[in-house]
């Protein structure tokens, strides 16, 4: 990840620990093995940061949310028993982001126009071959434009849209992460997509 967490849980020597089966790492972390948890952080921090950035729309806020999510995960990992670890981690990160968005709504501190600055490692998956500099610039502009419109969605719709259309999760996976039923997930996603289509109508998207 281009922007590392401000207080990583791992030391430089631990960066070169051999890759271990995730289930084994989770079980070790549940027994209090900090090094195993550090390895889990390394495995998932990029995805969690990307999720947080797409929801929060701001680099610093995403870094804070990512760090808070891993702190909570470490504190409560003994409560994780079954299911996919990444889904449990996404649930924590989504809740952290949702709480932060509600706080921002009560006390807005950052102008909307400053909420979006996407770097290469957080760009949407747009077609890219041997593009010209002009095409690359257009793709960056499009990624920023899409992020602006995502940031304008209500928090509950924003989260399901990011989980579905950015992270590529299924309805069931999103329901597990958000602790919602399938009907609620589909309804929120439909509303989010509808609002995106309306807000983007008349906007010329050049790929």
Image (cartoon, rainbow, N blue to C red):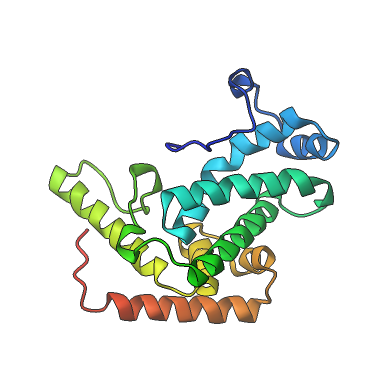
Q: Is residue 50 visible?
A: no
Give the position of the C terminus as an image quadrant.
bottom left
Q: Is residue 101 visible?
A: yes
Q: Residue at x 55, y 66 (%)?
A: 103
Residue 128, x across and y down, in percent: 27, 47
Residue 175, x across and y down, in percent: 65, 69
Q: Residue at x 63, y 50 (%)?
A: 69
Quadrant in the picture for residue 9: top right
Residue 127, x across and y down, in percent: 29, 52
Left or right of 206 on screen, residue 69? right
Quadrant in the picture for residue 181: bottom right
Question: Count of labels shown?
Answer: 0
Height in image: 63 above or below 203? above
Left or right of 140 on screen, residue 19? right
Quadrant in the picture for residue 206: bottom left
Q: Residue at x 45, y 76 (%)?
A: 192
Residue 89, x across and y down, in percent: 66, 51
């Amino acid at each position: 990840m281009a922007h590392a967490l401000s207080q990583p849980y791992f030391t430089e020597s631990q960066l070169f620990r051999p890759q271990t089966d995730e289930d084994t790492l989770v079980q070790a972390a549940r027994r209090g093995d900090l090094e195993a948890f550090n390895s889990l952080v390394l495995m998932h921090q990029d995805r969690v940061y990307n999720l947080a950035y797409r929801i929060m729309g701001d680099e610093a806020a995403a870094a804070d949310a990512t760090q808070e999510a891993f702190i909570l995960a470490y504190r409560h990992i003994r409560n994780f028993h079954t299911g996919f670890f990444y889904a449990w981690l996404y649930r924590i990160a989504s809740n952290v982001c949702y709480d932060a968005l509600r706080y921002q709504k009560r006390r807005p501190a950052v102008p909307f126009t400053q909420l979006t600055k996407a770097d290469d490692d957080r760009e949407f998956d747009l077609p890219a071959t041997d593009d010209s500099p002009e095409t690359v610039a257009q793709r960056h502009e499009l990624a920023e434009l899409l992020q602006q419109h995502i940031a304008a969605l209500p928090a509950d719709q924003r989260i399901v849209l990011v989980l579905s259309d950015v992270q590529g999760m299924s309805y069931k996976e999103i329901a597990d992460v958000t602790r919602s039923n399938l009907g609620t997930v589909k309804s929120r996603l439909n509303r989010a997509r509808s609002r995106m289509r309306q807000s983007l109508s008349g906007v010329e998207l050049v790929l």
